[in-house]
Image (spheres, rainbow, N blue to C red):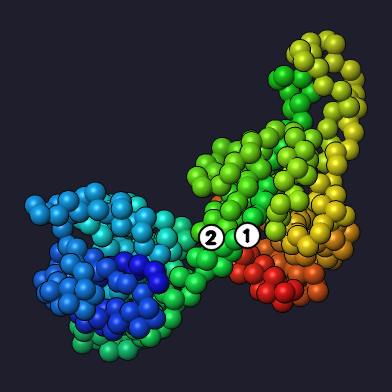
Amino acid sequence: MAKIALGVTSSVSIYKACEVLRGFQKAGHDVQVIMSRNAAKLISPLLFNSLSGHKTIVELFEEDHPWSVAHIALAKEVGLLAVVPATANIIGKFASGVADDFLSTFYLAVEAPILVAPAMNEAMLLHRQTQDNMMKLRAQGVDFVEPAKGYLACGDEGWGRLADPDDIVRRGLELLKKRVSLQGKTILVTAGPTREYLDPVRFLSNRSSGKMGFEMAREALLRGARVILVAGPSQVAPPAKADLVRIESAADMEKEVLKRFPKADIVVMAAAVADFTFAERTGRKIKRQDLPEALRLVRTMDILKALGERKKGQFLVGFAAETEDLRANAGKKIKAKKLDFIVANDVSREGTGFDADDNQALLIDAKGHATETQKMSKRELSRVIWDAIEASLGKRR
Ligand code: CTP
């Protein structure tokens, strides 16, 4: 049994929130309702009190209830926040970080999955601003149950009708299930570039930002896994709940990964490990006039290949950065490195891959089954990748 927060805002379809509440309860979950002030004008919170068995929260500050603190406690407790129905206003507030009532403040504190079921007039739904807000939230990992076409409260026929309550409940339950889908698993994720130093000032590196690996780690944490994150230098903030191991060079990465490999169930090698390092490294800055004409480089170890050779039941996920023949090259890497799964990126495309916020990938499993994803945010892609990895894991069992 999980605790579900049901956010209710002011659309005429508000009465359908009762059905959604009942649906979650029938599946065995406990529901706490949070209403916006305008929603409380449409339906009395008392109705939700008796349906849910809990006092409905409307105000952030109330004399007899210190909800202002409660929103943090409740945010930690819930397994899902479902906002049904969601107005253009609440979607706009979520997208811009406005926190001026309980629900919008609570939204910022929630770490659990968030499901939004919009309901509004067609013109408002299709307005550029609403669409931009929804796109922004999707990119941040918020799920939507798309509104349907049909008869609207304003008398128009069109898009904007709240989705079917059964569909909303079904999607909510799916999200709840995912929260524990990797429970009990130890997942080793590598991310970011490595730096190969020539001297204390100069180094060899690459364009990796660490974003994709961090999103893979974040999503695994959301699904209940223990995550060890071995990360190279990156400007992006790593997910707070991962056990973070900071490294700089390919040799450090090799040492830390090999040490932790025996205890891992799944390894996701998203790091862009330098393929070469300097044959010699000095402790003092080399003077310009002392630098040789050419510097000698030596190969680093292919860490993923080494893991493939040593694996005892671990599920190995590699990444492939390619500029041509994506499928053929990624397919070769799966075999050569004895992988169970590969995520191949075409890094020559504009706006995806290295250092971009978006990505598009070809996912290939050990049997050669390939799926091409759409272009989407790295956060959204991390979910698609984990869904595919979990499907492959399920088949292997
Ligand atoms: N990798 C690794 N150790 C290295 C180099 C790469 O573990 N020294 C891993 C990466 O983390 C990635 C995968 O191998 O998961 C593929 O990396 P990529 O750079 O695409 O391929 P390479 O194996 O270097 O092959 P090539 O440069 O020929 O495409």
- Tell me what residue is drawn at x 79 percent, y 23 percent: 198
Q: Quadrant of the N terminus?
A: bottom left
Q: Which residue is mark 1?
A: 185
Asked if 13 appears above or below 279 in the picture, the reply is below
Can residue 142 be seen in this snapshot? no
Can residue 185 be seen in this snapshot? yes
- Three-letter code, disc 1: Lys
| Image side of residue 40 versus residue 267, left or right | left
Circle on res. 201: none
> Residue 368 location in percent, x, y?
80, 73
- Tell me what residue is drawn at x 83 percent, y 32 percent: 277
CB under 8 Å between callouts 2 and 1? yes
Front-most of residues 175 and 310: 310
- Three-letter code, disc 2: Gly
Asked if 334 appears above or below 68 in the picture, the reply is below
> Residue 305 location in percent, x, y?
85, 52
User: Which element type, helix, strand or loop, lies under badge 2?
Assistant: loop
- Tell me what residue is drawn at x 50 percent, y 72 percent: 177
**Nearest to N terminus: mark 2 or mark 1:** 1
Q: Which residue is mark 2?
A: 224
Front-most of residues 288 and 263: 263
Q: Quick one: label 1, few (<14), some, or many (20+) residues within 10 Å?
A: some
> Looking at the image, how many numbered discs can be counted on the residues?
2
| Image side of residue 343 versus residue 57, left or right | right
Q: Quick one: label 2, few (<14), some, or many (20+) residues within 10 Å?
A: some
Front-most of residues 245 and 387: 245
Q: Quadrant of residue 273?
A: top right
> Residue 285 location in percent, x, y?
75, 13
Q: Quadrant of the C terminus?
A: bottom right
- Tell me what residue is drawn at x 84 percent, y 46 percent: 302
